[in-house]
Amino acid sequence: MKTSDTEAEKAGENTAPESRPSNFIRDIILDDLKTNKFGGRVQTRFPPEPNGYLHIGHAKAICLDFGLADEFGGHTNLRFDDTNPEKEETEYVESIQADVKWLGFHWDGLFYASDYFDQLYEWAIKLIKDRKAYVDDLSADEIREYRGTLTEPGKDSPFRNRSAEENLDLFQRMKAGEFPDGSRVLRAKIDMASPNLNMRDPVMYRILHAEHHRTGNKWCIYPMYDFAHGQSDSIERVTHSMCTLEFEDHRLLYNWFIQQLGIFPSQQIEFDRLNLTHTLLSKRKLLQLVQEGRVSGWDDPRMPTLSGIRRRGYTPEAIRNFIASIGVSKTTGSIELAMLEHFVREDLNKRAPRVMAVLRPLKVVIDNYPEDQVEEMDAVNNPEDESAGSRKVPFSRVLYIEQDDFREVPPPKYYRLSPGREVRLRYGYFVTCASVVKNDKGEVVEVHCTYDPATRGGNAPDGRKVKATIHWVAASSAIDAEVRIYENLFLKENPSEVEEGQDVLDNLNPKSLEVIADAKLEPSLAKAIAGNRFQFERLGYFCVDPDSKPGKPVFNRTIALKDTWAKLERKQGGRA
Ligand code: ATP
Ligand code: MG
């Protein structure tokens, strides 16, 4: 059977990872190697905050961090940015590690920002002694008010000129737990009139009497991202610290702390974050979907999380090829979801064994086929991969076909089964529809056919042609299965586009999940286990879900066969 997958393949010809699109970060690294800026070293890190599951956007960061280091024989650490104990959990730490491994990457060091809390505290003391940091008693609201705006300078806090001794005393007492949450902060003393708002005396430490998933109750003050991230990079001697564009305005501060402390000068480089149409990529919003029960969990196959798309049947290779093809830049845009799907089809087309499954069964009886006869038909496992071999598929008198493959009154250009029409049953015989049986409501519930024994295997010795080949499953040996059909979680191209007074979640597609309870599968699928991927001929790619029970498998539709991306591309006359 030929599907548009062949077209997808053609369209993908130029997308092998070796034909890499330009990558300005690689250029920076090449330049640094030439000038020996870091002694010829390349070291990166992937720094997730363990406050949710990783999503496809993170895959871009992971591929860059690990991919570029690998390319230059460098090292990559996995470092959890765990400075916010209220939102962070061990479950997330574990899922993140599993997801990075699944994508195919291996970290050198495994670290936590909390490993460095003692060092960070000492560095804060140093900055206080150097009169570069002070304890401020203003409330959070007041600090915001005093900060000024993009057009107006901020003004100094009345506590800005405390003596180093007083600051030291107050900071130590903050650490000792003497003050309630929110009553004081430690701030860097930089410039309240700086055109960069991040330089207007940013907060370094806040008081938070919260138990930390690793340090327990040791600390009741926690460093802010800006005072933890660059220093952690520096401690690990990271050379190229990649992050998304929203941190561009933080770079000045990143460098300022490193300079004041006189520590290893890691270099921050910003790139555009991945946005996908019809997809929400924000851990906070994804958490809301989970907490409100809008999806079955972080790994719901409709979620853009790595655990969700893994369960759905996407492959790590497809994701890596997709990420390689989109490149990196300094301008934020949105990538068509269809492009990701194109890479999923392209990869599955190569590796997924073909099987026959009927999602919405219609009974077919072949009147002239011997009652108790069962024939084992030869079926090709993968036309794209000769080494996949073939298998036997039982054929018998009573079969199921798709309801869609029969029309009592065929519309124009409909060539599948209809009264008097002859079609090919794939790997089977030519059959001709003789009559139908209807229920009380007048619906066709059974189709009667005759077969031509001379057409075994699917060809007529007299050379006559049929215009359609349809798939089928023999009733006596069929496996009953549940099949879950997924559509986009969001219909809108940009899910964040909401009417006044509405929430992103109001944009949810109410029909994103359809459960088919009584699909019929060919018996070879009895051996399938969770995670196995198949192409159901003519329908799409499907993956065995972990909800499967012995004798009652559950399949997720990974993706249908139609490749809108390849079509779009052809229309546009080249790659977008
Ligand atoms: P979210 O906005 O989804 O909550 P985040 O940026 O807060 O994500 P982190 O755990 O801080 O999540 O991210 C870890 C790394 O992944 C960071 O370097 C971040 O820049 C990067 N990253 C996050 N989202 C994307 C994205 N959509 N595209 C590319 N990189 C991303
Ligand atoms: Mg973050």
Image: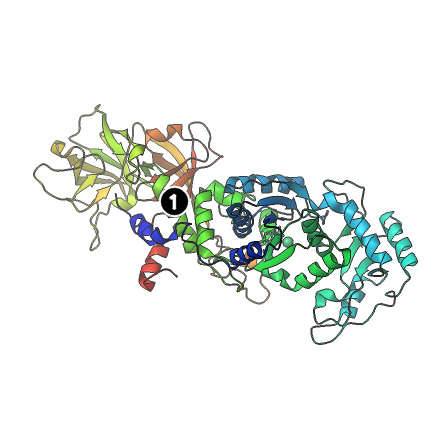
Q: Amino acid at mark 1?
A: Asp
What's the colour scheme?
rainbow
Q: Nearer the viewer, residue 506 or 108?
A: 108
Question: Residue 466 vs residue 540: left or right?
Answer: left
Residue 220 drawn at (x, y percent) = 81, 47
On the image, numbered disc 1 is attached to which residue?
A: 347
258 over 99 or under it: above or below:
below
Specify whether residue 207 is in view: no
Question: Residue 55 vs residue 533: left or right?
Answer: right
Residue 463 drawn at (x, y percent) = 9, 41
- Name the element at disc 1: helix
| Quadrant of image for the C terminus | bottom left
Specify whether residue 180 is in view: yes
303 over 547 or under it: above or below:
below
Question: Residue 24 vs residue 176: left or right?
Answer: left
Say which quarter of the image contains residue 540: top left
| Quadrant of image for the N terminus | top left
Say which quarter of the image contains residue 573: bottom left
